[in-house]
Image (cartoon, coloured by chain):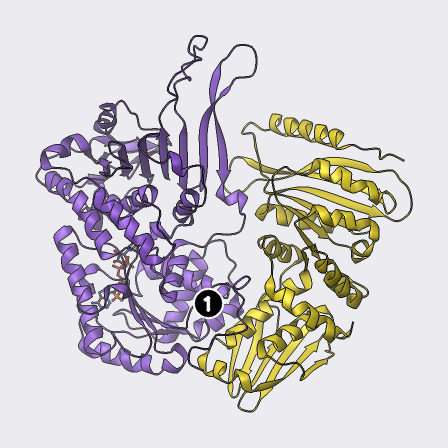
Amino acid sequence: MPPTVSPEAILKELGELWVALGAGDEAGVLRACAMTLIIAADEEEEAGVLGEMIAGIMHDHPSRAIVLRVRDGSDPDIESRVLAQCWMPFGRRQQICCEQIEIMASETGLEDVPRIVLGVMAPDLPVVLVCRSPKLFCLPAFQPLLSVAGKVIVDSRCASEPRKMLARIASLRQLGHSIHDLAWTALTPWREVIAGAFDDRATLSHLHELHHVSIKGGKRGPGPEVWYLGAWLLRGLDLETGIELADGETDVPVQAVELRGEGLNLSFFRDSRTVIRFVRGDVAANLPFTVSSDWELMREELALPGKDSVFEEILPRAMALAGG
Amino acid sequence: MEGATNPFQDSLRFDRRVPPAAIVIFGANGDLTKRKLIPSLYRLAFERRMPSGCVIYGNSRTLMTDDDFREKMKQSVRQFLEDTPFDEALWEEFAKSLFYLPGDLKDPAFYQALASRLNAHEAATGGNILFYLSTQPSHYEPVVNGLASAGLAEGRGWRRVVVEKPFGYDLATARELNQRLQAVFPEREIYRIDHYLGKETVQNILAFRFANGIFEPLWNRRYVNHVQITAAESIGVEGRGAYYQTSGALRDMIQNHLLQVMGTIAMEPAAVFEPNAVRDERAKLLRSVRVHKAEDVPAHAVAGQYGPGRAGLVNIPGFRQEPGVDPASLTDTYAAVTFFVDNWRWAGVPFYIRTGKRLPKRVTDIAIHFNAAPLSIFDRDNHNGYTMRPNLLIIRIQPEEGISLRFLSKNPGAGMRLRPVSMDFNYGSSFGVRTPTAYETLLLDAMAGDATLYTRQDMVEASWQVVQPILDYWSSRKFDFPNYDAGSWGPKESDDMLARRGHVWRVP
Ligand SMILES: NC(=O)c1ccc[n+]([C@@H]2O[C@H](COP(=O)([O-])OP(=O)(O)OC[C@H]3O[C@@H](n4cnc5c(N)ncnc54)[C@H](OP(=O)(O)O)[C@@H]3O)[C@@H](O)[C@H]2O)c1
């Protein structure tokens, strides 16, 4: 059964929207677009949360956002609507607006979606697909959409079966899809703090003596962040084994990291949202730390168009740690 | 393990690492320290860009304890930190690395005391020291000599000195200052700061010119008719009248900032993006700027001074009525100069530069005026006079950073009527992330040993060379000042200077 919406109809609606926006404002509006950003989410995901995230990203990466909401069931109907995200930058007189296209489809209707998306993408600009729903990501009907994007961003932290999710990321990467995981992105502050400790030449000179890594994760047991971090530490220390992953007491996904060796012990404890307590022998320091929101992680990922060779290298090790 | 690299570094995602160092600020009780230096260092710490192990020492004569200094700096950071929240916990950590050592810069014993304090941090800093001369220029020489005699100018780790403007008062004093500095520090360790070069948009000029294939072919005398560089301020001398009357607009803005901007606009591409390669090209360009003969100065340079005026409903005093200013002062609060670059690319293209205080608004931009289309085929039907408007590329440096291209388009409807439209790229809205301030960029660059955005001795001397005949001529003249009203776009002579070549100043 044919879809009820066509790319031409959506583009026509968009054109009318811009005319209306321009007419309502004496200074006119500035239309900003640097990429096509496709965001796929389950229908259950709260619209407010999604909208806030898109608004957050738009300021840094103005885009034509295509929001795909997928509902359960086999209803073949596809609906769409267009809207604009506008904001007035501080101290300016002209609003900046980005366009947003919402497409609603059922799981069955998904197979018609790539054709619509292809027709409404902004020409000549990069295409990024953010898949908010691990369930969608694993659906075979979703796979054609992956092919339209130069970069795909997923989040294994919200997967009910994170091991499976890592395996899917790895297999799709092997097929040539450029899949990135926000669980890895979320580790940047942790990794930066640990790397900073080895900027000290004396510490660096003991690096090869370190032979044991222990990571304390969240209370629900080690998850993707712990596996990725463990894999990255083993890679840096050139170790195959010697890692211990423990459960923590709180929901914080990585609570502490310890690196032990003959001449040197290094410990990192997450004290609060902004501080990591670092102890080396009898020296202690509080190091600044940041926890990023979902859209801040997305912002970091969107700013990196190329490939991430470190992630590529540690993904198989992380899967081994996950036992998948 | 000497020379071993840190396997945990990830240049894709982590900020550039800089080695830990001691930063010594001379003149720490002054304006620049509280407004710019400490807020920028705090901001770098906030962004986790300051390496651990860094210490910051402040010096001036006023007696203060470390805690007094920390408290004073805390207030300054709260007051002057732009678009960044103040984080109490982070400040506590940052403040632990702040120290204060009172002393007179003319006192040799002070440098000995400084040396022993800095030695105590050597394990953490690796012996690296950045000396920041945030004092009056008369102190530069005693400071570098004091550092040398206390053995601080060399040692374990690197030793660098950052020098604030003005670099000399004229060509002769600039040369003398360079010799004095170089007697103690090698040129590669001298970082002359020009905060204009640290601005993101000025750096973006390099990206715009050399990362895009479409503009560079037009960037020459065949297509460019002339260039206008404007740096206008709406404020007056804001209580700094006494200082300002020893300087003036030409010295304060054109000799350094605006000639460096012109260098960036007009330089040849460097073979590689490395500090000395980029600086070589900028220096080469500055050396190609024609030095006007004394008799040519009146036709190519205009001095102005504002008289009283009104802005909105407020009366504004003239420069001579400002506190601390000589009522017969002949200082230029406005300067406009026509420069020519004598090389193959730019021969015959005028570069007009103007700057002034008490102009209608605060704006800095560069306008590249292209030649008009060789034949205007629309003239017959068109009566609105737009046909001959040439294309204009505007690079806006402040306040709204961005790039606009103006071109002609057909007016909707019947008939071929044209009107100018503008295609805008807005730096702030395209990359909504906060851009670092010039001082953040420059401080971090100095610690990393990257001098790309700092000026070099030959650049400083070349730019003095081109303004010197103008300074000499102006100092021998009795101007009939004031010659422009506060709140206007400057003296009429400035418009006349452009009119002689058939040009007009644009209204930015
Ligand atoms: N302010 C700006 O926005 C700005 C802009 C561009 C360039 N600059 C340049 O930056 C530099 C610093 O500017 P500033 O306005 O902060 O300077 P400043 O206020 O004139 O001087 C800084 C401090 O130096 C101390 N000092 C004076 N004589 C001393 C001595 N013999 N020994 C030790 N300390 C002494 C004074 O504190 P004590 O009385 O406690 O000794 C003074 O507060 C200058 O070269 C200026 O040209 C400033």
Q: For residue B302, which quarter of the picture?
A: top left
Counting other residues with Cα less than 10 Å from the Cα at mark 1, is it few (<14), some (14-19), or many (20 or more)?
some
Quadrant showing the N terminus of chain B? bottom left
Letter of the yellow chain: A
Residue B42 image point, x, y percent = 44, 64
Q: Residue furthest bottom?
A: A262
B287 and A96: which is toward the camera: B287
Q: Does label 1 point to a residue whose CB lies under 8 Å from ligand 1?
A: no
Residue A274 image point, x, y percent = 58, 68
Quadrant showing the C terminus of chain B? top left
Residue assigned mark 1: B17
Letter of the purple chain: B
Type of the residue with mark 1:
Arg
B203 and A31: which is toward the camera: B203
Q: Quadrant of ligand 1?
A: bottom left
**Residue at the image position 11 percent from the left and 39 percent from the top:** B473
Q: Chain of mark 1?
A: B
